[in-house]
Image (spheres, rainbow, N blue to C red):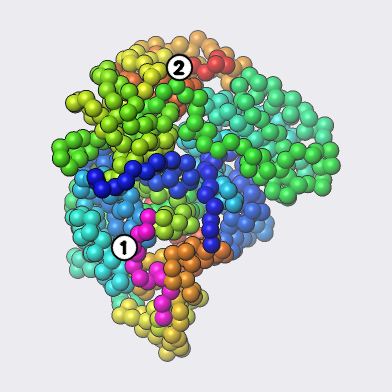
Amino acid sequence: MTTTPLRTSHATDHLDLLESHAIFILREVVAECERPVLLFSGGKDSAVLLHLAVKAFAPQQLPFPVMHIDTGQNFPEVIDFRDATVERVGARLVVAKVQDSIDQGKVVDPGLMGSRNRLQTVTLLDAINDNNFDAAFGGARRDEDKARAKERILSFRDTFGQWDPRKQRPELWQLYQGKVNTGEHARAFPLSDWTELDVWQYIERESMALPDIYFAHDRDVVLRDGMYLAIGPFVEPRESETVERLTVRFRTVGDANCTGAVLSRASTLSAIIEEVALANVSERGATRADDKFSETAMEDRKREGYF
Amino acid sequence: MQLATKDLLRLATIGSVDDGKSTLIGRLLVDTRQLFDDQLDAIAEASERRGVGDLDLSFVTDGLRAEREQGITIDVAYRYATTPTRKFIIADCPGHVQYTSNMATGASTADLALVVLDVASGLKEQTRRHLCIAALLGVRSIIVAVNKMDAVDWSQLAFDRVVDEIVTLSRELDFTSVSIIPVSALLGDNVVESSSNLPWYDGPTVLDALERSEAGAWEHTTTQGARLPIQWVLRQPGGGRTYAGMVNGDTMRVGDRVTLLPANVETTITSIHFGGDEIDDATVGLAADLGLAAETNAGRGDLIATAPLPTVSNELKTTICWFGEKPLVVGQRLRLKHTSKVTPVRIKIINGVIDIAKLDIDDSTTLNTNDIGLATLQTAELLVVDDYRVNRVTGSFVLIDEATNATVAAGMVGHASFL
């Protein structure tokens, strides 16, 4: 790093403080746990998380692998981004496939159009178990959902992978203690205190790359249950539906068949930041069919061991 | 669009159950338009289904099923709010005594406590307990929302009676900044909008008081000397090593004379790095890594400090908030985590338990669940500590149950001045 000019650093604005806090958590968990892994989907939050992990351990390589829970229903742009990013940072990628869980008879295939979102939990817990991971970093944020708002930065899972919101460890000061007994594991969420807007401002500040689908583009979509779904291998138009070609972007990236696009002309980071700052619908409300089932959909999934 | 640089204020709500903490935070977030339309719709829908009116504001933070069924807060909810110049991290803490450890979790990182109490019942024992814990945790500023003014017909007399109680206790607990505001969280009076029901009150609203209070108090405790507890050692290309950790206490600069502890090796900072880039100083709160002139075998758990230096000891006089289910007794063995160091510890002496009502120490020799007491600890390895009132990072620790790995106590080096 001899070519980098000296600069004065002042950890004073909110992004600096959030960044350093996240780096601190990454280092602490790596030091306390035996076999951590970073969950990386190729979405914006996990991209920020991986970026922070690289910073936390620079100039050395990442001291842990990254893992993608692959539902097999991805946007191809996101998989391309995943592979390019992992190669650029020189990380080892573990891919755990929901299809394998289906083939093993552990979960039932919901069919081409069915959501595999909930099935990921089984694949995730098996992969954690098979690889003996004792800590998994995730990019979840507390502003995403009311159940997430209740979760600790270091959150424990019993031998069944379950989260018990009534029995969380006290988490005092910045004394994160990550020790677990055999068979248990910790989830660590370094972006807990970041909001959607913080994430976008940070991406802009760091000039980070992201999958193209986050930026406005023309795409064939159908309007289903109040959301624009992209026509593709996992979404076919139904008889009653009309395919429209619209200028859209994705505010979150999940499975292609349950992530809605939003109408948007924001094709640059600064335009996206402006859009997010003025939004009147939440990120998950605008784009995730999987959260609309019930009042406590996220809490129920988290209890089972979901991200 | 140019978004201004913001500072960061962390606050925790404290007070007894049913005095309206969650409702106040709900009101604050709704009236400052921090909630999205779909979130408001979901809260309205849940309120109707559970038969609690049009919009139960406590549902903004009480997000767990059990919380909504029972109408109480079980664990801390973190919510975020922004104004043009400030980001707020709000920890809405539970009021029940059995969830005191969760309250301490929320308050341990707070710059400020937002105290909520019912004007009709005044300072309950649980509110005193929370204020006492907040004071012990180093919170120096409080905003007291005297709630449910609508239920006492906006009576100035009722308000003044509570004010006297608060002022007396605040003096005893050494709070340096105290704002006391009559509010109705339910109706919104004096939360964000000034109230026309309270013509006798001309002070700030809760939001005004929050915007005026000092941010970053957590990071900028009264300090003596810079500290960097080593979390991790990084190998640099070419063979050197740097020592990674978060800077606290004071800025560290290239060229600073530092001491590596507990080894007591004096040396100089030769380089400072952040995220792989070289920088020339590291301010408080920065997760940096440092190069040192001396060849050392420093590692995780060691500490780099500038003068005045911290204390190196294996015997500590401490204040302990005990959360374990069984009582803490003399001779008990636990694990202690202090900065990045973990060591076995034994309880050598228990000097007494704090009587919350009288704010003095009795002569108990055991600590029951949620008791706060004074204890002398003996650690297997040397610790490098500051008094908690001087440095919240090097002055704090947790105790861990060796069998379950559960965190069973919050500990502070030294004793609060009001004891």
Left or right position of B282 against B10:
left
Give yes or no for residue A210 being in the magenta stretch: yes
One can see residue A238 in this view:
yes
Which residue is disc 2 drawn over?
Answer: B414
Residue A77 image offset from top left, x and y in percent: 30, 71
Tell me the magenta residue range.
Answer: A206-218
Q: In this view, does B299 lie above or below A53?
A: above
Residue A76 image offset from top left, x and y in percent: 28, 73
One can see residue A152 in this view:
no
Left or right position of A178 against B141:
left
Residue B201 image offset from top left, x and y in percent: 80, 38
The C terminus of chain B, quarter of image: top right
Tell me the element at label 1: loop
Front residue (pair B269, B110): B269
Chain under disc 2: B
Q: What residue type is labelled 2?
A: Gly
Q: Which residue is drawn at 39% across and 26% down?
A: B226
Chain under disc 1: A
Q: Which residue lies furthest to the right in this view?
A: B199
Left or right position of A168 against B276:
right
Q: Find residue A42 and name its label.
A: 1
Res B346 → quadrant: top left
Q: What residue type is labelled 1?
A: Gly
Q: Residue at x 53, y 56 (%)?
A: B3
